[in-house]
Image (cartoon, helix red, strand yellow):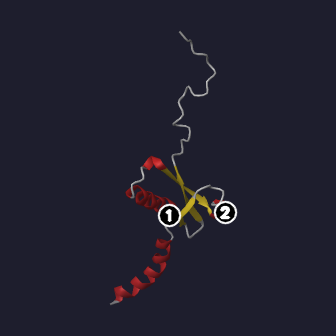
Amino acid sequence: MKGIKWIFPVLLVVAPLAAQASCESVKADISQKIINNGVPESGFTLEVVPNDQAEQAGGQVVGHCENDSHKIVYKRGSMESDASVPAAAGSSEDTPTS
């Protein structure tokens, strides 16, 4: 019976700490859910930003972390926006014609 008396105070201290999930773990969970819905990993980005910068991030807020002090912003597409542009695109080199 004496051992049970210390469990309740420990739970009171530990429970709020567990509720304040780290941003990386929340971001990983959200990322996995998006991938499970059929979106390829290269088809989106998730960015952790402070609350006051969530509007400027240019995406959709899909989660929050660290006691609601940070937001997780979802953006469609990959981070490499010019990856689909060929290396020779826009070059000014003349090509010989036969």
**Is there CB contact under 8 Å for labels 1 and 2?**
no
Would you place residue 82 above or below residue 74 in this image? above
- The amino acid type, in three-letter code, at marker 2 is Asp
Give the quadrant of residue 47: bottom right
Q: Is 3 placed left or right of 19 in the picture?
A: left
Which residue does the image show at 35% across and 89% down from the upper left?
2
Kindly state the secondary structure of the residue where label 1 is placed: loop
Q: Which mark is residue 5?
A: none
Q: Crowdedness of circle 1 by 10 Å Cα count: few (<14), some, many (20+)?
A: some
Q: Is 78 placed left or right of 69 in the picture?
A: left
The residue furthest bottom is 1
The residue furthest front is 98
Give the quadrant of residue 96: top right
- The amino acid type, in three-letter code, at marker 1 is Ser
Q: Mark 1 or mark 2: name the one nearer the start of the chain.
A: 1
Which residue does the image show at 51% across and 70% down from the upper left?
20
Q: Quote the CA–CA distance across marks 1 and 2.
A: 18 Å
Give the quadrant of residue 53: bottom right
Residue toward you, 7 or 29: 29
Q: Position of residue 97 (x, y in %)?
A: 55, 12
The residue furthest left is 1
According to the picture, the residue beneath numbered tag 2 turns out to be 52
Kindly state the secondary structure of the residue where label 2 is placed: helix
According to the picture, the residue beneath numbered tag 1 turns out to be 22
Residue toward you, 29 or 35: 35
Which part of the image, by quadrant, shows the N terminus? Answer: bottom left
Q: Position of residue 70 (x, y in %)?
A: 58, 64
Would you place residue 49 above or below residue 40 in this image? below
Q: Position of residue 92 (x, y in %)?
A: 64, 21
